[in-house]
Image (cartoon, rainbow, N blue to C red):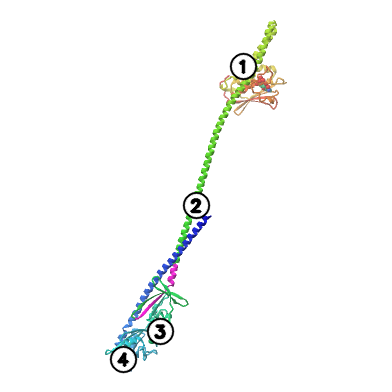
Amino acid sequence: MRAGVTSFAKRLGIWALATGLLAMLALISLELATNYLLDDLAQRARTTLGITIAGLKGALGRYRSIPQLIADNPGIRALLLAPASPRLVRAANLELKRINAAVQASDVYVMNVSGLTLASSNYELKTSFVGQNFSYRPYFQDAVSGGLGRYFALGTTSLKRGYYFASPVRADGRIIGVVAVKVDIDQLEQSWQSKDQVIAVTDEHGIIFMSSRPDLLFNSLRPLSEASRRAIRASRKYNEAELRELDLSPQGSTQSGLALVAVPAGGKPAEYLMQSRPMPAEGWDIQILSRTGAARTQAYIFSSAVLLVLLSTMLAAAFLVLRRQQLLERMRNQSEVQEELERRVKARTTELDETNARLLEEINERKSAEEELRKTQADLVQAGKLAALGQMSAALSHEFNQPLGAAKSYADNAVAFIDRGRIDEARENIDRISMLVGRMGAISRHLRNFARKPNVELTTVPVATIINDALEILDRRIRALNIKVRLDLPPDELWVLGGQVRLQQVLVNLINNAIDAMEAVYEPEVVISAAATGRKICLSVRDRGPGIPEEIAERIFDPFFTTRGVGKGLGLGLSISYNIIRDFGGHLQAHNHEGGGAEFRIMLKSAVNEPQKVQP
Ligand code: ADP
């Protein structure tokens, strides 16, 4: 938050500084432009001033020597010598009129030494000078005293502004009169007309007597002293004209030291640049006043343009800075996102590494658990084997001890009977011993089957043939007990993978068991069937006996398990059969048939219908 305020204050400061700098630059540019444009204005005004002065000098120069020329005119001289002669007056008047027309002056006239006009070019006009006395005019006074008169004045009769040139007329070395030429100066002003410039010519008193602006005429640029006013009045220079003082309020000066003044223009005063140059020969000052308005407007426009350019530059710079900041910000954000991503990837990688390590650990644990299990299994198998061995030993010792004990008793009895001469009883006992030995032999024969090699090579065995062989072996018993045998076999011979003699032994066992189970059955029947299902062959032996009681179903395949009485069953048939079928890669299953009786199913691998070498 504090950082935000600081950065805001910093930005505000930068903006204020930039705005200040901008304003300063704009002001400087305004100042420079104003100075330049005012200097340019002054330069142009000076040029105009030069041209004006040259024009004035040229115009006046044309008339300067004319009075002298007229003074040499014999007619004029004759008039001055005999002023009362009407003929000479008329001749002089005519001559002056002619000269006036020739030199394009306003008036040309001749005065005697008293200042009385004897002849004049305007003798015919109402405003004729003839008879008028101009002795008060300084140009007359200059000329009558031998100099060349030059003077500006407002005509007393014509009320027109004129410039007077005068020259003495001499006869025999003395001055007998004065010739004067009046030049109308109205026409000289005509070329000065300009909207933005005022040209004014001031006399030695500072009074404007020529100007491009008529309203400024007879205004004094300086305060008039009483002496000046008196002198003016005496010379009737400005006749009855009212002399005012022009209020040119000073407005300071330009950088190059030129005066700036306010000149009344219509209603409100306008600012002008004032320059002047003297015309010493005439005793005049030529003033040129240049209106500064346009220059100042131009300067404002220029500085506005500069301001605009600076402002746009500043805005462009601000925009660029802003953009750069945004870019930096974006880059910063991106790098933050990148860092975050990298951090996450790193974290995830670490997690994965940890998970991997955990998995490895688990795998190792599992391996060792498996190892442990395998070991335990091996131990169990070993224990199982031992248990089975123990069980078998117990069963065997029971199976053998009982007949052995019985045989021992029979033998002892036989000895006793022989001793007593009871040979028949002794024979009976010995027969019983023989029977017991036979039984033990049978047990031992069966036990041999357990010692068979399990991996004897398998061969293809024809199913129907084996079934018939088995039935043939049991033929006597079947007949004796009147057992009905039903065969359900497919027309084509089926071939299974196994051993011929062993499969036959299994079938004999199963059929024997079926016959045993039907001891109490009225119409005993054994159904033997064979069928192919896919790549398997199913052989089935079914009887019509009571079926397998549920409580012993799980134990019937155990060795020595039998439900038949002592001396009848060995409990090895199913156990041996189960192992034989398993060795063939098949299964032996027992279940009770829905229609009654037990059914034993042998599932064997089908050996594709090709008879191969027949093995026992
Ligand atoms: P044994 O025939 O010597 O008793 P087995 O291993 O062949 O020995 O049979 C074990 C037991 O299975 C028999 O005692 C009998 O209880 C039962 N059993 C076998 N076959 C059948 C059958 N077809 N029906 C009913 N029970 C049977």
Mark whose residue sits in front, 3 or 4: 3
Q: Secondary structure at mark 3?
A: helix
Q: Secondary structure at mark 1?
A: helix
Mark whose residue sits in front, 4 or 1: 4
Q: Which residue is mark 3?
A: 226
- Of the numbered discs 2 and 1, the one sitting upstream in the chain is 2
Mark 3 C-beta to ligand 1 under 8 Å: no
Q: Could you tell me which residue is drawn at 35 percent across and 78 percent down?
A: 278
Residue type at tag 2: Arg
Residue type at tag 4: Leu
Q: Which residue is mark 1?
A: 445
Residue type at tag 1: Arg
| Side of 529 relative to 326 (left or right) | right
Mark whose residue sits in front, 2 or 1: 2
3 and 1 marks in contact (CB < 8 Å)? no
Q: Quadrant of the C terminus?
A: top right
| Side of 508 relative to 134 (left or right) | right
Quadrant field for ligand 1: top right
Q: Position of residue 377 (x, y in %)?
A: 58, 27
2 and 1 marks in contact (CB < 8 Å)? no
Q: Which residue is mark 2?
A: 330
Q: Which residue is mark 4?
A: 80
Q: Position of residue 342 (x, y in %)?
A: 50, 45
Q: Secondary structure at mark 4?
A: helix
- Of the numbered discs 4 and 1, the one sitting upstream in the chain is 4
Q: Position of residue 256 (x, y in %)?
A: 38, 71
